[in-house]
Image: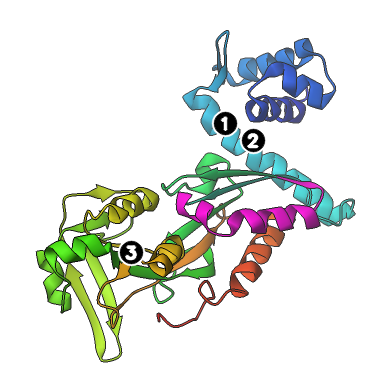
Amino acid sequence: MDRLTCMAVFRKVVERHSFSEAAEELTMSAGSVSKYVAALETHIGTPLLARTTRRISLTEAGASYYAKCVRILDDIEEAEKATGQHHPTPRGLLRVRAPISLGSAHLGRTIADFLARFREVKLELTLNDFFIDPAEQGVDVSIAIGNNEREPMRGARPIGRMARAMIAAPAYLRRHGEPATVADLKHHNCLIYNRGQSPDEWHLIAPNGDRTIRVTGDCRCNNSQVLRESLLEGAGIGLLPKFLVADDIASGDLQVVLPEWTPESRTLYAVFPQPRQPSAKVREFVDFVATSFATDSQWRLGFSNG
């Protein structure tokens, strides 16, 4: 059997988690789809899919092969577009990974606008707080949070800025007192978002200089939304994305701590599989998201930390 056809059928089975659904989309019989996958497994010499009565899952070898299949098939599609100009507009499935916290930002609205403009693109968005190497997981683009613009992430394009706020519930501050200086943070229970480099070190900026303080606390978590809920219950002082707590600050449920000091912002990056060049659908999506961020001052690159 034609190997590229086998790879395309295998990819569709993985994406649809079903032989029958893949067959329907490919206008094939379920038996033909099964034969193509079996031929591919025979050619490679190892099972690619683990089949049970309820679900289909990738084996370890299958997961690695799937990621490579996606790259190869997408490269072929892109080469045909570039050479023959058959499809002048972006099309096909676009796989995007982003941090969970961005689900509370305007990313959903941006995606809806993007899909309304590019009708031939279908988007599959996965939200999690772990960095995923696009080349290893078959992802077209991964939105990641880096330290700042002065320390750029290699092989990635900066697309937005994420301001942060140092906050606590009024109830906590009434019980424990408000810190008067940065050094006072050492005597408070600080809730720590434990992703990224040196999560225990908070870098703060003021007109008269910068300061890095090492904090401690009884709660560490890799999800900022969970930390926000703990802060609202008066658990301690936290440092979270500003967009996530802006409404809480406005309502008075959370209060800015040491307002003369501004936490250093983070930079959002679009990370592509390397060394591949981004496809047309990826380029258009990243440009679209970057433009969307640029229209809002709190997300705009190059904006001050205030």
> Please, what secondary structure does the residue beneath circle 3 have?
loop
Disc 1: which residue: 65
> Please, what secondary structure does the residue beneath circle 2 have?
helix
Q: Residue at x 46, y 64 (%)?
A: 243
| Mark 2 residue type | Cys
Q: Is 121 one of the magenta-colored residues?
A: yes
Q: Sequence-wise, which precedes: disc 3 or disc 2?
A: 2
Picture coordinates of residue 253, whole percent (x, y): 35, 62
Left or right of residue 5, residue 187 in this image: left
Q: What is the magenta range?
A: 100-122
Q: Are marks 2 and 1 in contact (CB under 8 Å)?
A: yes
Picture coordinates of residue 15, whole percent (x, y): 65, 30
Residue 20 vs 238, above or below: the answer is: above
Disc 3: which residue: 254
Residue 161 vs 110, above or below: the answer is: below
Q: Which quadrant holds residue 272?
A: bottom right
